Image (cartoon, rainbow, N blue to C red):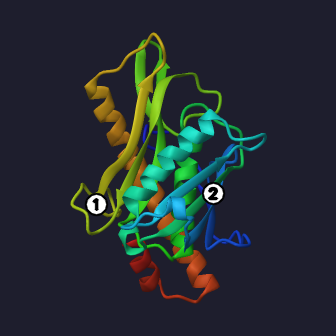
Amino acid sequence: MSSTALRSISISCEEGLDGVDGSARFSFRPSCSALASVSGPITARLAAEHPARATVEVHVRPLSSVPGTAEKSRGMAIREIVERSCLLAQHPRTLIQVVVQALTNPTPGYALLAAEINACTLALINAGSIAMRGVVCAVSVGRVKKGSVVSVEVDMADDAVLEGGGCFAFLFGFALSGPIKGSAPPCEDVWSTYSARPGSSFDQAELVRAREVAREAAAEVWQCMKNNIRRQKMVGEAQSPEEVVVKMEI
């Protein structure tokens, strides 16, 4: 497997959850899966109202027990991504509520966070009630030591011993001016985190390499999302492929 290759990706945008505007499930593999739902724009509490834009509220829930520090940290990251990717000024004084449910236990590195970000993106697309600048796709990157060499790879095995790693989220849209990867539209980096384990370190060159590896893998995620949405829309609503492509090319 190459450093940018992804294993099986599973996507479902037809969860049919009650009381929400959109929902979706995203899995990198059976051991790394998340479900997200989106409600909004809805009436915001007076204390949460913003006069110029919609307020974004994100709740991340673990597979079991109650949310802890890790879930709150991932929730802050997802909220920042939603705020950067959605056109919130179109819905002032309203609330957009996102609920992300982990369907598996945390995996090594940031794979679960990447799955949660992608599930959130698909839920926003499924809702169709909130305009977006583009489609956000995220992947996790790990620093894997092989002998005396540390390589940067995506989609690490669950039992991989990591020297560190991170998560990169990219916004894909044909109106952007970023680089083009394959059939995917131009993209820009909207959120990222990268670190080495205690006692280890990395340099600027490695960070650049990690971002490039992640960008190529994120383009593959975008293509998987596009193909899945096209299939589901054609089967469920008898839409033409051209209509689905337009929706993905926000």
Q: Amino acid at mark 1?
A: Pro
Instruction: Please tell me which of labels 1 and 2 falls first in the chain.
Output: 2
Residue 186, numbered label: 1
Instruction: Decide which of 219, 164 is in the foreground and name it.
Output: 164
Vertical arrangement, residue 217 with respect to residue 159, above or below: below
Query: What is the tally of numbered marks visible in this picture?
Result: 2
Instruction: Decide which of 112, 145 is in the foreground and name it.
Output: 112
On the image, which quarter does residue 158 sit in? top right
Q: Amino acid at mark 2?
A: Val
Asked which secondary structure carries label 2, the reply is: strand
Q: Quadrant of the C terminus?
A: bottom left
Residue 99, numbered label: 2
Please tell me which residue is depicted at 47% across the width and 61% down the height of the picture: 55
Please tell me which residue is depicted at 44% across the width and 85% down the height of the picture: 243
Residue 240, numbered label: none
Mark 1 neighbour class, 10 Å CA radius: few under 14, some 14 to 19, many 20 or more: many
Pinpoint residue 140: horizontal percent, then vertical percent: 49, 40
Q: CA distance from mark 1 to mark 2?
A: 28 Å
Please tell me which residue is depicted at 57% across the width and 49% down the height of the picture: 115
User: Horizontal placement of 136 versus 21: left or right?
Assistant: left
Please tell me which residue is depicted at 72% across the width and 49% down the height of the picture: 103
Q: Is residue 111 visible?
A: no
Instruction: Decide which of 16, 149 is in the foreground and name it.
Output: 16
Q: Is residue 85 visible?
A: yes
User: Horizontal placement of 146 versus 206: left or right?
Assistant: right
